[in-house]
Image: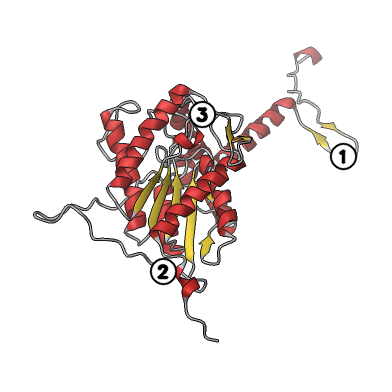
Amino acid sequence: MSQTDQPRSRRHPEERWAEGGRRLHSAGAAVVVALGALGLGLLLNAPGIHKSASTQPEGWKRNVALALTGPLQDVSSALLLDRPRRALKAVLGRSSDDRIDTAVAIPTPQTKPAGSGTSPPPVARTKFTPEHKLRIWIAGDSLVIVPGESIERAAAGSPVLDPLAVDGRIATGLERPDLFNWFTHLRQVMKTKRPEAVVLMFGGNDDHDFMTGLPKGVTIGPFDSPTWIAEYRRRVGGLMDTITRAGGYVVWIGLPITADPAQTRRFDAINAIVQSEAAKRPGRASYLDTYFNFAGDNGGYAEYLPNDSGQLVKMRADDGVHFERPAGDLIAREVLHRLYQRYDLTSWRRRPSTG
């Protein structure tokens, strides 16, 4: 066999080495490693990714995201790759971060027995003292934050009021418990902190068509339709019942007039539901109308309003929805007035001297 007829040995690419003896890999290998790391990262964080998809606004983007992240979470769980994230969240005290809780946990509406009176029994005007202070919990969406802080400041000067920290959650409400479940949270607060007075403000993010947490088999129409109203009414009344059946008193701050007339009309629809539900619970729930407090002389939206001295003061934030501090202080005075009407917060001053 001639030299040219001998079989050729297969040539392998020569390995490349960098300075210091480090082996160099091909670009393809680097891409494979990067994709593998990306896939592993997605599986390790699948629960959080799936929750982020769930909390997106209604629409095709949310539907696509759920369709992709749902199977990803299933694979992560099957391979036990969600355990490290779960353990880390537990250590940080944030075990509920990845939980998608849409349960609208509210008490069953009470029905009056046949032949019973139409008026509920009167509510006792409980007495509070510096030794037994009135605990106040203030909660809601972003609109409650400024008034809540004003209530805290005003209550700080009273020896009988004990306001808890303002629990304001941005972009939350009663429509989307998957974003933040106020129904579950409220029950926990009433059980652990036991506030006697609860100040709420919801609805700023609820003027939409889409709701999560609907009962099985229930569908609703667009915002302000009869079915939407019925479900939102159920949620509002349920929150009130959760508080009142635990012995608490509700002051629900109504939504204000805004710079957008269409938004104001939507807020009016929500306010009508809240006002009517509070009226069903006399002595146990109170609706605080804010509309006329922040309307101008012509009944329309006003950014500046005169104070007690007649000076114009900026009441509303630049977004035409939220409050500035003077507006918060005004609401705080109205809330505290309701509490002084509902409870005996002053007779302790007249107790006989022991001297």
Q: Which circle marks residue 21 in the picture? A: 1
Please say whether residue 294 is visible from this viewpoint: yes
Quadrant location of the C terminus in the rendered image: bottom right
- Counting other residues with Cα less than 10 Å from the Cα at mark 3, is it few (<14), some (14-19), or many (20 or more)? some
- Between discs 2 and 1, the one toward the N terminus: 1
Most extreme residue toward the right, as rendered?
A: 19
From what the image shows, is residue 92 above or below residue 268?
below
Q: Amino acid at mark 3?
A: Gly
Q: Do the CB atoms of the residues marked 2 and 3 lie less than 8 Å apart?
A: no
Viewer-side residue, 177 vs 303? 303
* Residue positioned 25% across, 52% down in the render: 108
Query: Tag 2's secondary structure?
Result: loop
| Residue wearing tag 3 | 296
Which residue was labeled with disc 2? 127
Return the x and y of residue 286 as percentages of the image width and height.
Answer: 37, 49
**Which quadrant of the figure has residue 115?**
bottom left
| Mark 1 neighbour density, 10 Å: few (under 14) some (14–19) many (20 or more) | few
Rounded to the nearest whole Å, what is the CA distance between mark 2 and mark 3?
A: 39 Å
Q: Is residue 305 above or below residue 333?
A: above
Other residues around mark 2 within 10 Å, as few (<14) / some (14–19) / many (≥20): some
From this view, report whether residue 275 is shown above or below residue 163. Answer: above
Q: Earlier in the sequence, mark 2 or mark 3?
A: 2
Badge 2 amino acid: Lys
